[in-house]
Amino acid sequence: MHGKDVCLSGVSISYPNGYTAVETTDLNINSGEFFSILGPSGCGKTTILKTISGFLDPSAGTIKIGGVDQTGLPPNARPTALIFQNLALFPLMSIWENVAFGLEARGVSKAQRKARALELLELVALRDQAHKKPDELSGGQKQRVAIARALAVEPAVLLLDEPLSALDLKLRQHMRAELRAIQKQTGVTFIYITHDQGEALTMSDRIAVMNNGRIEQIGTGDEIYSNPHTAFVASFVGETNRIEGRVVNISDGIVEIDGPLGRHWGRSGSELSIGDNVTLFIRPEAMTLGQGKNTLSGALFRRDFEGPFVNLFFKVQGQDFSIHQTKSERVISEGQQTLSFDPEKATVLRTKSDVTFK
């Protein structure tokens, strides 16, 4: 199996009632890449997936897979396979028959179908379950059967729509590693839809963050977490502390802001001008106790112990701030404390009126 690249050029998707689910979008996904589209419910990510697979037609623009225009091609003529949250395994068929189902429609002989199904069950570590029925398997095993079934038709692109959301947390975390391993082994292009930032950050080569029908940023997990381009991306991906204010000075990429919590400095994350309304974002692990260039005075009101880590929560003029520490750092008692952060570790972004913060 080999992956193919997927290219969306000027694609937008609107419904007859005038609602636009996906604004004009250009997106290039590389061959053999594990690419995630991350965003809240209703942002348009599943609509993009259905359009790539041929279940929806774009209102404008073109989709190419491996350089071939897919316009007018039905789902079964595209080099794609789609796995929904609802796995839709056939309850009366054995596991190997479920995996081989797509091959029967293509006229492959029973002996070849079974041989191929067993190969794929080997890949997903379920060969010894081949003769069982779906209801004899666990949730994670069913998930692997669905992946094997999708791979049986040798897609160049595998489309996965929130496939782990029905599993419990431990199984989800285990399946993330398994999915990533299967993708690397097969070389198939994976396009993965999720609202779970942990899934996207753990598995993906690159991530597109979507909001209100638009892709706001594309990058590696590290780029999106460390250098968010918009206030939405900064607030949606990872935990963050926020300081609101207006820009009063910009010098060498460092922005000075003035707001209800006083004057603070951070690096500019976007094009800014004096007088702009902005939010300064600081990750909890970038804040420390003690004096620094940027300081706040807050009262400790909660301490959450998580084994090697401790999360400390402070009230600063009625606003909550959190600090993420390793256990080895000094223990503090409740009461007023000085919090600080390095300007280089804080990002200043223009505040949009439509941003909803956690």
Image (cartoon, rainbow, N blue to C red):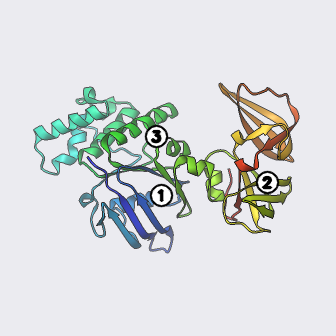
- What's the residue type where badge 3 is placed? Ala
- What's the residue type where badge 1 is placed? Lys
Disc tally is 3
In the rendered image, residue 82, in percent from the top left (x then y), is placed at 34, 51
Could you classify mark 2 by the number of other residues whose Cα lies within 10 Å: few (under 14), some (14-19), or many (20 or more)? Answer: many
- Left/right of residue 349 with respect to residue 46 in the rendered view: right
- What's the residue type where badge 2 is placed? Trp
In the rendered image, residue 276, in percent from the top left (x then y), is placed at 76, 67
Point out the tag, 3 or 2, that comes first from the N-terminus: 3
Can residue 209 be seen from the camera position used here? Answer: no
Question: How far separated are the C-alphas under marks 3 and 2?
Answer: 43 Å
- Contact flag, marks 3 and 2 (Cβ < 8 Å): no
Q: Which residue is mark 1?
A: 45
Element under disc 3: loop
Q: Which residue is mark 2?
A: 265
In front: 115, or 343? 343
- Left/right of residue 231 with respect to residue 298 in the rendered view: left
Q: Which residue is mark 3?
A: 166
In front: 70, or 264? 264
Q: Residue at x 75, y 69 (%)?
A: 273
- Contact flag, marks 3 and 1 (Cβ < 8 Å): no
Which numbered disc, 3 or 1, marks the residue closer to the eye?
Answer: 1
Above or below, 92 against 200 in this view is above
Q: Residue at x 41, y 40 (%)?
A: 180
Which numbered disc, 2 or 1, marks the residue closer to the eye?
Answer: 2
Above or below, 315 against 233 in this view is above
Element under disc 1: helix
Could you classify mark 3 by the number of other residues whose Cα lies within 10 Å: few (under 14), some (14-19), or many (20 or more)? Answer: some
View extreme (front): residue: 252
Can residue 29 be seen from the camera position used here? Answer: yes
Element under disc 2: strand
- Left/right of residue 224 with respect to residue 330 in the rendered view: left
